Image (cartoon, helix red, strand yellow):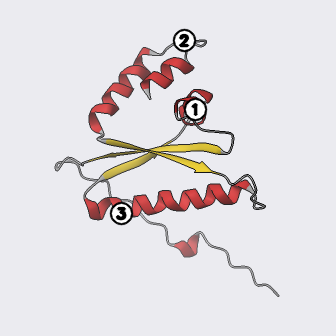
Amino acid sequence: MKEIYREMSKETGINEKKLEKYDEKAKQISHIITICMRRNPESKLPEIEDIIATGCVIQNIYLMLKPLGIAGYLSTGDICYSEQTKKFLNLNENERCLGFFQLGIPLNDIKLPDKKRIPASEKTEWIDGN
C-alpha cells in the first residue's frame, strides 16, 4: 500500500507522516485481504446489488474474527479506489476494489471499549402497507 501511495502522490507530493503511518500499520498487522467485486457484464441487476452482496461478505468476515481470536478492520479511502490500485491488482473494467481488510492478533493487554448499543427499535420505523 505504501508503494501505491507513493505512485498516487507523484503530482501532489508525498506526505512523510503518512508514509510513517503505513510503516507503523505494517508492524501491527499480519495479513491484508483485498476485497474486490467482479461484476458480470451481462447482469441485468443494478451494480449497487453486487456492492451490497460484497458488503455482506465483509460482515461475515467481521463476525468470524472474535471466535478465531483475530482482530481486524476494513480500510477504505482514496488509495482503495485509485487507478494505481486498480493497475496494481490487475483489475479489469468489470472489477472494483472495495477495501482492504487488515488482520492481526490482538495484544492481551488491549481491551476494547464498552460500546453502548442503541436498541434496533430506536432506529427502526415500521410502515403500515395499508
Quarter of image, res 54:
bottom right
From the viewer's perspective, is residue 112 above or below residue 15? below
Residue 92, image x and y in percent?
Answer: 64, 39
Kindly identify which residue carries mark 3: 64
Looking at this view, name the residue that lies furthest to the bottom.
130
Residue 58, image x and y in percent?
Answer: 48, 56
Say the numbered circle drawn on residue 13: 2
From the viewer's perspective, is residue 17 above or below residue 50? above
On-image quarter of the C terminus: bottom right
Given the image, on which type of amino acid does mark 2 rest? Gly
| Residue in view at x 31 percent, y 28 percent | 24
Given the image, on which type of amino acid does mark 3 rest? Met
Kindly identify which residue carries mark 1: 78
How many marks do you count on the picture?
Answer: 3
**Of 58 and 17, the residue lying toward us:** 58
Under circle 2, the secondary element is loop
Q: Earlier in the sequence, mark 2 or mark 3?
A: 2
For discs 2 and 3, the disc positioned in front in the rendered view: 3
Looking at this view, name the residue that lies furthest to the right.
130
**Of 110 and 117, the residue lying toward us:** 110
Disc 3 residue crowd, few under 14, some 14–19, many 20+, Cα 10 Å: few
Q: Could you tell whether 20 is left or right of 54 in the image?
A: left
Disc 2 residue crowd, few under 14, some 14–19, many 20+, Cα 10 Å: few
Q: CA distance from mark 1 to mark 2?
A: 15 Å
On-image quarter of the N terminus: top left
| Residue in view at x 63 percent, y 54 percent | 51
Under circle 3, the secondary element is helix
